[in-house]
């Protein structure tokens, strides 16, 4: 997909972070943009600011963990603009501590948004795109955490490994069908977003009954400190969006934002090929 002007883009998690950067990039390309997010105030602000810049934009409050809300998002998109050409399954959250200490609420919430959100997006929009017959593209946001192993961030990593595998499978299946739908998986490293403040959007039914105050498990605490530094010093979302559009134009599947992180992917691959235990 190389031409974007006049096409329709759908972006989940569009009110902030990478999603907001992607939505703004879509607008600069002359696309009609459908913004989806659970944060209604931030979503309305994003819609207003895009419209003020001259873009055609529509905000649809959407909880991607719920199939019916993603289906409603697709319906609103078709009613407003008649088609969907570019889909960014981008909404994401983070929660949990060690794999065994993370609560069921941590697992359910993170899996619901990060993995089921992508599943719902694919199941809803791919049939529409196939029916349209137009040139389309899907970008699923995973993470470098979906390509590596190691301690901590287990709940988050499970969801992102799932997104990588889902995306790889989707790509293969669409190639077999000779469909005009490209696929990319975005695996960013440190990006300056609000991912570490995800709790602001956790629904009441997914709240932990007991909130532990104090230092986390040492491995988790160390990882959290490193992650916060990576995020605070991270790449601007607008720069990530530029990389994404370049990859779409080049029909490139894997989008890795940080060259130096490839060494960690290589290390995990060597662990597998050489029969070594993860370190």
Image: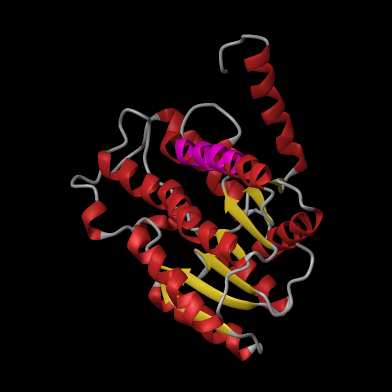
Residue sitting at 44 percent across and 33 percent down? 154
Magenta segment's dominant SS is helix
Q: Quadrant of residue 272?
A: top right
Q: Is residue 166 magenta?
A: yes
Residue 3 percent location from the top left of the image: 78, 70
Most foreground residue, 96 or 217: 96
Residue 159 percent location from the top left of the image: 46, 41
Q: Can residue 187 be seen in this view?
A: no
Q: Give the range drawn in magenta.
A: 157-169
Residue sitting at 69 percent across and 18 percent down? 270
Above or below, 143 relative to 83: above
Residue 198 percent location from the top left of the image: 41, 56
Left or right of 210? Residue 49 is right
The count of marks equals 0
Image quarter where the N terminus lies is bottom right
Above or below, 196 relative to 125: above
Most foreground residue, 163 or 177: 177
Q: Can residue 35 be seen in this view?
A: yes
Residue sitting at 63 percent across and 66 percent down? 22
Image quarter where the C terminus lies is top right
């Amino acid at each position: 997909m190389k031409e974007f002007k006049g096409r329709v883009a759908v972006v989940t998690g569009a009110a902030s972070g990478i999603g907001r950067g992607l939505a703004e990039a879509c607008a600069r390309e002359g696309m009609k943009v459908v913004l989806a997010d659970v944060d209604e105030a931030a979503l309305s602000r994003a819609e207003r600011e895009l419209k003020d810049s001259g873009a055609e934009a529509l905000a649809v409050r959407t909880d991607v963990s719920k199939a019916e809300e993603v289906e409603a998002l697709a319906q609103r998109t078709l009613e407003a603009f008649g088609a969907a050409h570019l889909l960014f399954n981008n909404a994401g959250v983070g929660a949990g501590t060690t794999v065994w200490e993370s609560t069921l609420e941590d697992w359910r919430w993170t899996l619901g948004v990060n993995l089921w959100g992508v599943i719902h997006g694919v199941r809803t929009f791919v049939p529409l795109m196939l029916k349209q017959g137009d040139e389309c593209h899907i970008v699923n946001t995973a993470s470098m955490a979906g390509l590596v192993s190691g301690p901590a961030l287990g709940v988050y990593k499970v969801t992102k490994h799932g997104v990588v595998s889902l995306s790889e499978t989707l790509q293969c299946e669409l190639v077999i069908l000779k469909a005009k739908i490209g696929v990319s998986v975005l695996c960013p490293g440190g990006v300056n977003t609000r991912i570490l403040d995800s709790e602001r959007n956790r629904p009441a039914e997914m709240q932990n009954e007991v909130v532990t105050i104090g230092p986390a498990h040492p491995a988790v605490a160390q990882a959290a400190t490193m992650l916060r530094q990576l995020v605070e010093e991270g790449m601007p979302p607008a720069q990530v969006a530029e990389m994404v559009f370049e990859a779409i134009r080049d029909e490139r599947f894997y989008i890795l934002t940080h060259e130096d992180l490839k060494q960690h992917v290589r290390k995990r691959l060597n662990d597998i090929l050489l029969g070594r235990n993860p370190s």
